[in-house]
Image (cartoon, rainbow, N blue to C red):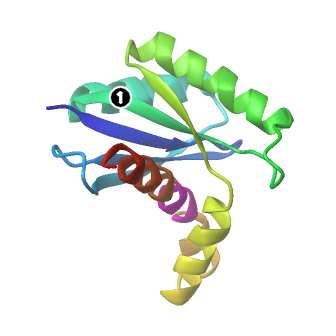
């Protein structure tokens, strides 16, 4: 079996979450710097190999009415680059409200300031991956 990676792509930081081998829960999370796309892709390729990832899910930031804006196009382009770099199939997944949910989760657990900033992208990636895993299990 191979794991699934969820990615919450951002301008400054990119959250990454990786499932367990049964693809039932999130097992690993990380936050990677995003400013250098080439370095980010190298980090993702490394994680894909190390963690034996067989599928990748990239969050697609849609507007609340379901339309796609410029940010969605950036994420689609990033997903294409990830697929080319890793050779692993990439699926886009609607990520509406995941960042808001991630902030709510961190607030409930008393994460504030720098601690929150360093964690929110990994939590958002976990929510993207959890949504996708739930969809797959139906």
- Asked whether residue 101 appears in the rendered view, the answer is yes
As rendered, which of 125 and 33 lies closer to the eye? 125
Direction front: furthest residue: 138
Element under disc 1: strand
Looking at the image, which residue is at 41% across and 55% down?
Answer: 130
In the image, residue 30 above or below residue 102: above
- Asked whether residue 114 appears in the rendered view, the answer is no
Report which residue position mark 1 lands on: 55
Estimate the x, y position of residue 45 in percent, counting from the top left.
38, 23
In the image, residue 32 above or below residue 97: above
In the figure, residue 1 lies in which quadrant? top left
Looking at the image, which residue is at 58% across and 25% down?
Answer: 79
Looking at the image, which residue is at 43% across and 49% down?
Answer: 129
As rendered, which of 42 and 83 lies closer to the eye? 83
Estimate the x, y position of residue 81 in percent, counting from the top left.
57, 17
In the image, residue 25 above or below residue 77: below
Q: How many marks?
A: 1
Estimate the x, y position of residue 122 in percent, counting from the top left.
48, 57
Q: Residues within 10 Å of mark 1 (few under 14, many from 20)?
A: some
Estimate the x, y position of residue 7 in percent, counting from the top left.
50, 41
In the figure, residue 25 lies in which quadrant? bottom left
Q: Give the prevailing secondary structure in the magenta stretch.
A: helix
Q: Is residue 68 left or right of residue 77?
A: right
Q: Is residue 122 left or right of residue 94?
A: left
Q: Is residue 51 covered in magenta?
A: no
In the figure, residue 56 lies in which quadrant? top left
Extent of the magenta region: 119-124
């Amino acid at each position: 079996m191979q794991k699934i990676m969820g990615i919450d792509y951002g301008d400054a930081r990119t959250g990454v979450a990786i499932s367990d081998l049964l693809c039932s829960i999130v097992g690993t999370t990380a936050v990677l710097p995003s400013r250098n796309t080439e370095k980010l892709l190298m980090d993702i390729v490394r994680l894909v190999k190390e963690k034996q990832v067989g599928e990748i899910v990239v969050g697609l930031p849609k507007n609340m009415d379901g339309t796609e804006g410029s940010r969605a196009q950036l994420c689609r382009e990033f997903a294409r680059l990830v697929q080319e770099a890793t050779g692993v199939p990439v699926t886009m997944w609607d990520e509406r409200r995941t960042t808001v949910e991630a902030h709510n989760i961190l607030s409930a657990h008393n994460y504030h300031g720098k601690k929150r900033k360093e964690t929110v992208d990994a939590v958002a990636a976990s929510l993207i991956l959890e949504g996708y895993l739930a969809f797959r299990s139906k």
